[in-house]
Image: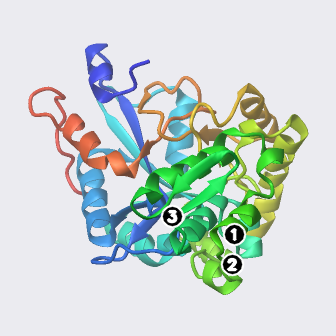
């Protein structure tokens, strides 16, 4: 299926919705972390430029605007709509992204994995990255695979993360502890992990500032790796729990990891049953308008932002005008 902008144009349908997803923002001039580099997007300066571009070139929607667009089944002819979302409630989203969003006048949508905020513990991807990065060993054994570290760390980490993404969750429940032993590295302290995450008070402040807060399940386990009843808890129960934490209704949901292999028809049906009004995938393209499936709205990674910008603003091809600043 062609989900790119060029495909939309070829079919004579320039109307589209670009939902750009971020996880983390680097401080300007800094690009080092003890945890997973792969979840970082641009630094703060580049993020500002990206938000200014979205504001100038597209009609940027907040959560209520997204809901209205999906509910009406379409928008203005020839319009390019956009929205900005963040997954996993990292602290730099509050410290670095929030001031930029306020400066530019964009209200984003933040998806929260409840257990991470309650326990002050990072997700499996960050812990795995920490262990592999901190190990002094040149290689480690994970199951039947021998993984090299050092220069091969990136591909070895990808192998480990794919175990969490694709294997049944019951098979990976003790994998982090196993990695800790294999790498000869203790798990990161709770204080070290806590500093990377937003607090409930910060999330409530985002909501008070007009940003949307959505569910990203309790545990951020990959839904397709879970049996039905566990999925139900992660999807259905998390809505009411999150609403109680932030003091308001929760209308939006994002599938953890979010690729087409990472949730299933059962997941989508449970999202409907839970009463969410929209749900988002990840790295799955650009939505055509009208949005035909509001429980599988595609999002694009911030890592591909420059490619998206080039496609959307191809001179003479897209026929887009630059919006006047409001």
Residue under numbered circle 2: 186
Mark 2 lies on a secondary structure that is loop
Q: What label does residue 180 carry, if any?
A: 1
Q: Residue furthest left?
A: 316
Q: Position of residue 8 (x, y in %)?
A: 32, 21
Q: Residue at coordinates 14% horizontally, 34% vertically from top-left? A: 314
- Dividing the picture into quadrants, the one containing residue 198 is bottom right
Measured in 3D between alpha carbons, the distance from the residue under mark 3 to the one under mark 1, in whole angstroms, is 16 Å
Q: Nearer the viewer, residue 256 or 53?
A: 256
**Residue 214 appears in the rendering:** no
Q: Residue at coordinates 62% horizontally, 40% vertically from top-left? A: 279
Mark 1 is surrounded, within 10 Å at the Cα level, by few (under 14), some (14 to 19) or many (20 or more) other residues, namely many
Q: Earlier in the sequence, mark 3 or mark 1?
A: 3
Q: Position of residue 102 (x, y in %)?
A: 39, 70
Contact (CB < 8 A) between labels 1 and 2?
A: yes
Mark 1 lies on a secondary structure that is helix
Q: Quadrant of the C terminus?
A: bottom left
């Amino acid at each position: 299926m062609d989900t790119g902008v060029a495909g939309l144009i070829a079919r004579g349908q320039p109307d589209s919705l670009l939902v750009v997803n971020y996880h983390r923002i680097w401080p300007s001039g800094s690009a080092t972390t003890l945890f997973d580099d792969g979840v970082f997007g641009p630094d703060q300066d580049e993020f500002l430029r990206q938000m200014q571009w979205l504001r100038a070139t597209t009609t940027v929607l907040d959560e209520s605007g997204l809901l209205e667009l999906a509910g009406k089944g379409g928008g203005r002819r020839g319009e390019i709509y956009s929205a900005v979302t963040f997954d996993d409630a990292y602290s730099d989203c509050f410290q670095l992204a929030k001031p930029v969003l306020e400066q530019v006048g964009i209200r984003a949508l933040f998806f929260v994995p409840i257990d991470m905020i309650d326990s002050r513990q990072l997700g499996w991807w960050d812990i795995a990255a920490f262990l592999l990065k901190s190990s002094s060993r040149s290689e480690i054994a994970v199951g039947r695979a021998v993984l090299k570290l050092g220069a091969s760390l990136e591909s070895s980490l990808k192998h480990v993360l794919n175990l969490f993404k694709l294997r049944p969750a019951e098979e990976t429940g003790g994998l982090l502890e196993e990695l800790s032993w294999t790498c000869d590295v203790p798990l990161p302290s709770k204080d070290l992990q806590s500093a990377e995450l937003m607090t409930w008070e910060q999330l409530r402040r985002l909501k008070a500032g007009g940003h949307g807060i959505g569910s990203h399940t309790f545990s951020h386990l990959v839904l397709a790796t879970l049996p039905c009843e566990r999925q139900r808890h992660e999807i259905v129960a998390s809505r009411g729990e999150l609403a109680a934490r932030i003091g308001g209704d929760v209308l939006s949901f994002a599938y953890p990891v979010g690729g087409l292999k990472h949730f299933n028809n059962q997941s989508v049906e449970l999202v409907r049953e839970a009463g969410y009004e929209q749900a988002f995938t990840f790295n799955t393209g650009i939505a055509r308008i009208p949005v035909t499936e509001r429980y599988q709205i595609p999002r694009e990674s911030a890592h591909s932002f420059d490619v998206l910008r080039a496609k959307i603003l191809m001179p003479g091809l897209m026929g887009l005008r630059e919006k006047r600043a409001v």
